[in-house]
Image (cartoon, grey):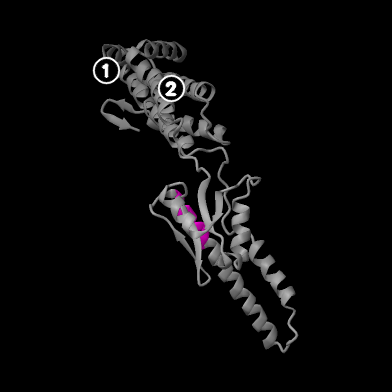
Amino acid sequence: MFVHNFKYAFKTLFRNRMLIFWTFAFPIILGTLFNMAFSNIENSEKLNIIDIAIVDNSDFQKEEAFKESFKVLGDEKNEDRLFNIKYTDEEDAKRLLNDEKITGYLTFEEGKPRVTVITNGINETIFKYVTEEISQSIDITRNVLNSEIQKEIMQGNYNVDYEKIYRYVLDMTLNQEAGIKDISSNNLSYMMIEFYTLTAMTCLYGGILGMTAINQNLPNMSNNGKRVAVAPTSKGKVILSSLLASYIVQAIGVAILFVYTIFVLKVDYGSNLPLIVLLAGSRKLGWFVFRIDGWNCV
């Protein structure tokens, strides 16, 4: 009886065109639209090399830390190159900025860096942030260096080896480990939230399948349910077989969605795909709704 009712419920669900559309076709259509709408968003937001200028005068030549930092950040051989730098005088830098050929330019006034821009945007913010970070690193190094020198003097050592202290401080400030470690997947895109939501929506529709399969066995919902109610059969087997049929149908729908998004749309779900599939399978059970003679169970 269990196998017979399972086959009957399975065939009935597959013959319901409305259910098949919402659980099979609609997620695929929506996933295709997501891919068409969002596929190029990250490429359009990719950070490009920023054009800047540095006023190359006597004040700048005194700032060794800034010279070396921007030399690395503007090196064409550096894969992490951030700036395209033009070294010029202040008049030429102003002209380039007014002609919108550069994002901004850097000058020094009394040993303090000054970034000049005419608009506010992402590139301008990055330029200012990098300059501030370099300046703060210099201040930290200088403070630590003075502290180490004072420590040597307080210990009675007046023959201070300044070069040794300088190397020690430089090594300590530049080679210290970061306090924050990125353990996220390198391949995970922030746009994947859309496809995670699509998978959750598909699992949600599993509740419709479960409700439809159970309603077919309720006497107050269908004529078939009336016949089941008076038949000398185990109601528990009927309910369990209907539930199993609806779960398998929904599992097929989710599997088709995964196959379509991974192999056709080339969606990268990250390195934890087996756990994602397992989570989707467990969530389907949570959405099934049982309605038996007025008693609701989720």
Residue 284 x, y percent position in the rendering: 43, 29
Which residue ends up furthest to the front in the rendered image?
Answer: 91
Instruction: Please name the residue shown 56% across and 70% down the image.
Output: 139
Instruction: Please name the residue shown 44% across and 35% down the image.
Output: 41
Q: Residues within 10 Å of mark 2 (few under 14, many from 20)?
A: many
Q: Is residue 20 left or right of residue 293?
A: right
The residue carrying mark 2 is: 250
* Range shown magenta: 123-132
Which is nearer the N-term, disc 2 or disc 1? Answer: 1
Where residue 297 sits, quadrant-wise, is top left
Which residue ends up furthest to the left in the rendered image?
Answer: 220
Residue 296 x, y percent position in the rendering: 30, 31
The relative height of residue 119 versus residue 47 in the rendered view (above or below) is below
Q: Nearer the viewer, mark 2 or mark 1?
A: 2
Instruction: Specify the label residue 161 is tagged with.
Output: none
Residue 149 x, y percent position in the rendering: 67, 81
In the depicted view, which residue is nearer to us: 294 or 186?
186
Q: Looking at the picture, which amino acid does disc 1 mark?
A: Pro
Instruction: Please name the residue shown 46% across and 31% down the image.
Output: 40
**Is 208 a magenta residue?**
no
In the depicted view, which residue is nearer to us: 56 or 264?
56
Q: Looking at the picture, which amino acid does disc 2 mark?
A: Gln
